[in-house]
Image: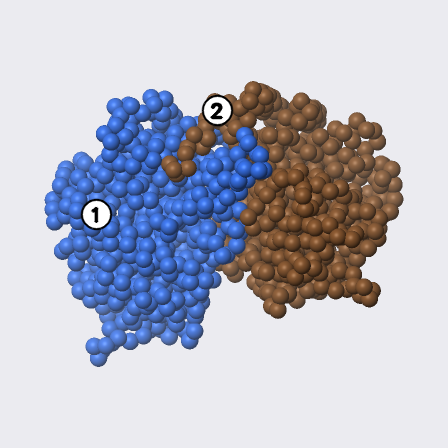
Chain colours: A brown, B blue
Amino acid sequence: MPNPLVDDRLVDFLLRDVLDVPGLARLPAFADHSPETFDAYLALCRRFAREVLWPSYPAVDREPPVLAGGRVRVHPRLREIWPRLVELGVLTASRPPEAGGQGLPHAVAVAAHLYLMAGNLSAYALAGLTSGAARLVEAFGDAALRARWLAPMLDGRFTGTMALTEPQAGSSLADVAARAAPRNGHFLLSGSKIFISGGDHDLAENVVHLLLARIDGAPPGTKGVSLFLVPRLRPAPNGGWEENDVAVTGLIHKIGWRGLPSVALALGERGDCRGWLVGEPHRGLACMFQMMNEARLMVGAHGAATASVAYQESLAYARERLQGRPASSRDPARPPVPIVEHADVRRMLLRQKAIVGGSVALVLRAARLADLAAHAGTGAERERARLLLDLLTPVAKSFPAERGFESTALALQVHGGYGYSSEYLPEAWLRDQKLNSIHEGTTGIQGLDLLGRKAVAGGGAALRALGEEVEAARARAAAAGVDAAWGEAVGEAAARVGGLTMELARRGLDGDVEGMLLHSADYLELFSTLCVAWVWLEQAAAAREALASGRGDPDFLEGTLAAARYWIRGELPGIGPLVERCRAGEDSYGRVRPGWL
Amino acid sequence: MPNPLVDDRLVDFLLRDVLDVPGLARLPAFADHSPETFDAYLALCRRFAREVLWPSYPAVDREPPVLAGGRVRVHPRLREIWPRLVELGVLTASRPPEAGGQGLPHAVAVAAHLYLMAGNLSAYALAGLTSGAARLVEAFGDAALRARWLAPMLDGRFTGTMALTEPQAGSSLADVAARAAPRNGHFLLSGSKIFISGGDHDLAENVVHLLLARIDGAPPGTKGVSLFLVPRLRPAPNGGWEENDVAVTGLIHKIGWRGLPSVALALGERGDCRGWLVGEPHRGLACMFQMMNEARLMVGAHGAATASVAYQESLAYARERLQGRPASSRDPARPPVPIVEHADVRRMLLRQKAIVGGSVALVLRAARLADLAAHAGTGAERERARLLLDLLTPVAKSFPAERGFESTALALQVHGGYGYSSEYLPEAWLRDQKLNSIHEGTTGIQGLDLLGRKAVAGGGAALRALGEEVEAARARAAAAGVDAAWGEAVGEAAARVGGLTMELARRGLDGDVEGMLLHSADYLELFSTLCVAWVWLEQAAAAREALASGRGDPDFLEGTLAAARYWIRGELPGIGPLVERCRAGEDSYGRVRPGWL
């Protein structure tokens, strides 16, 4: 049986039984849709992922792009795949019909795209980048920019990038140094960028960079950074297209995502690189952060999808591979058993299942919150969804990246010595997975974002909303007959985390910002563990409901309860020492001097 | 400054101040030696590792071996390195003079070889394999075998392997199926082996496999497995050497350790593969396990060395790479700071330091116990050292593998986007490191060994000896003026682990072996965390002593105290929930059915 990439039962269960995504069809924004049209898009993506993307993955991973004559050539399979991905509607799935899209809820689009990511991550990624870049043009570009660039981006003739990073600046966008000198109706760009995913390739006609640079005379720091549209080819006076002085100066030899080229760019080496301002001058970071937050959720989805396909592979292997005998009966005359029978292998599989199911649930919940933030019936509902979405974004980005890396490593470990060879796929997914803790804001940056901004925003309003969600899940679980101890454990943990947050916030308010933020990594970890316990509690409730009413696959529902139990009883207590570490101000790494290391 | 591979201050401090390895020179077995000769060997290996091995690593990693015409060709650099490694004395460092060795303590040899492993893991590994295989011949071979094979193995003309694994059996040695039919003075071997490291190459004249097989008519299971010496070339009637019908049927495309070929072998395809019995018939596993335990400690050393070189690389990078500004002052007009100034980067570095220092300490302590087990003055001392060594072996094998993998991933993370490219080395070490949780017994098997055998052996005698060691470390720490809370925390944790062990042992004695062993992974993790806290407490004591007496580099000693504090205050409390999980019998993965996953 081929790898299913993602368990259909999990996705259907989350969409229908846990998150009531079909109910979104009742909102006016989705009036053209119905649960049936949601399912139809899901079915299309599932099939395409399984029949087209999945078989392409090993070859694309083995033969990364090459740089020749100043241009990047990608794997030929990707040139075949790209138009078919576009045709599938991936670029426009969740855009409103008036913007040329299908108007699907994010929750449906993300669920469907999980399969594409799991099938071939870097083939999908270019679509995600292009879609995000188009959304920036749509949201902040003036009428002329929208008229010129949107259509070819949305029909896949042009692809898009996020061109933020510079060699000297890395994560520090305050140090963006690319320059933009105003000319007649455009700017002349100069400077260099690095790690630009999809920054050049030969699978579409043009590349449109959404790029950060500083207008001459702009203030220093993040407040002087503007957003520009800088294409590889620009409109020529004769009505055609001409080179725009954007040179590829290097191709990064990435260890994973090897279908997607990542390049270094030099802008304006001949003094003739034109860019067009997107949005207000000096407000580029605010624009970019709209895309960045969506990009962070997409990274979470990448992490979840990669962990999922690796989990499915190791599960199939563990069911087939015969080796050894149970601890209780080692009689060598008996035939060996499938390794899934060994407790430690089941531990590795259940841990993967809990991480995968928790990650997918986080990502889909965030997507549904994005739908509600945009389209819920009342302003109060929209505001509440926005608060929760902001709070969950660093969690939904970093948990699937960090625990997903661990989960993917377990998939390799289940394969034993075979997993250590490139004849088997888990090592490739492990390489893919490692990027997710780095790009679109490292895990360290997610921790600072969560503790330094999101958790304390609005006087704790987001945290209170999360507390209400936890209470709602407890009530649902209690009504469904889930073991009351699980709900209590999650409720107590939420209360502890709430108390800790207030305590740390007070430290910050009292002027000890360094002392508060010192714990951001621990805080991110314990907060994420709690959020995943909450989504598992909800899944346990929905599983009990389904079992009681005879809906769904009993094996899947029992497995859901087992994973929920594992996380809530096994993992959640681990936040205790982390909370204490933060409260006690354990500050070894605050104190340690660089010279002591 | 080039990468130091391992911090000389750490190694010198552990050998002298913590473990009193110079004191071993007073034992009769090491009478030919002195602290000066210990240092001389250490200095030779340090220089060779830094000047010869380290510069060879990137090329050797990039160009793995190839299989052509039935033979394996390794990287040409390795052919130059091999005779120089032999000349350095690596094969014979810790063998007694009467066996042609230099008679150094294991503790000195392992410390010196850590540098070689850190410099180029797979270049060193062939020496480790050959040395271990020779030791098996020395210990169990009859006079004829020793006379024929030992000299060319110890002078590097022949290399050795451990040929255990078969395609269908994996970790399950009870299922070894290779056959051995008795003939005149030898056996005719048939069957296949897989994942045989160093199983073929072109850097020495011959390969000597120490190989498990079943004599015709042997009982099933592990009690019917015998050990054979099976060379690639055997002595020919004419006095030369002839092919021994050992065919290379495949080369594994490993993701790391890419200098060391790993092959699949077919024995006796032409019915003419000769082997010679080593030791008693059907006792092969007992013989092999002598080598296996040494091999497990060597895997721990590999893990520690790889984590060390990656840590040093990320530390140097963090001191040089300028990016961002402190959280307390983000004024963009100020120049950016080295990233080592950021708290989260210091956290990642201090965590690596704690894992590396803990791993090196575990490995060197185990080596010193091996010296005492063989050479201590009294039988009681030898027996106590043997007990402790047995107990610590699964910990010293798996902690550097598992936490070392995490540590190496942090080294990559510190490098940000650059770390995700193959232009930088951390990704290569991450690939190398992953093998250590798989070979010579997976981490799952180490957990079963620790909880199922070692921790409960001799009615808990080994555990009591460990308790005494912890008490001795506490007394030393108290006398040196280390914060009393640290000693209390370690003492309390040891008592909890002791109590838990007895509780789990009772479960086993009451007939619930599955229920006891279900927790072996958690137990291994909490036990390892405790052991590392113990070795850090000792290091803290020795650091305080050195600071008080004005010995040593104050920066290094303060860093030692910081890492000890981090582990004891930050990590050790994490065992609480693990202990509770085991005690409560949290058995999600025991209960989960294969069909639920």
The residue depicted at 46 percent of the width and 30 percent of the height is A590
- On the question of residue A219 being in view, the answer is yes
Whether residue B41 sits left or right of residue A99 in the image: it is: left
Q: Nearer the viewer, residue A422 or A96?
A: A96
Q: Nearer the viewer, residue B114 or A509?
A: A509
Q: Which residue is mark 1?
A: B39
Q: Chain letter for mark 2, please.
A: A
Q: Work out how far the residue at label 1 is from the one at label 2, CA to CA, in angstroms.
A: 42 Å
Query: Whole-percent x and y of residue A305?
Result: 63, 47
Is label 2 in a helix, a strand or a loop?
Answer: loop
The residue depicted at 33 percent of the width and 67 percent of the height is B79
Q: Nearer the viewer, residue B210 or A131?
A: A131
Q: Is residue A554 above or below residue A64?
A: above
Q: Nearer the viewer, residue B528 or B359?
A: B359
The residue depicted at 37 percent of the width and 36 percent of the height is A596
Query: Whole-percent x and y of residue A81?
Result: 71, 61
Tell me the tag on residue A380: none
Alpha-carbon neighbours of circle 1 within 10 Å: few (<14), some, or many (≥20)?
A: some
Alpha-carbon neighbours of circle 2 within 10 Å: few (<14), some, or many (≥20)?
A: some
Q: Is residue B146 above or below residue A97?
A: below
Tell me the tag on residue A585: 2
Whether residue B449 sits left or right of residue A587 in the image: it is: left
Query: Whole-percent x and y of residue B297?
Result: 32, 47
Total label count? 2
Q: Amino acid at mark 2?
A: Gly
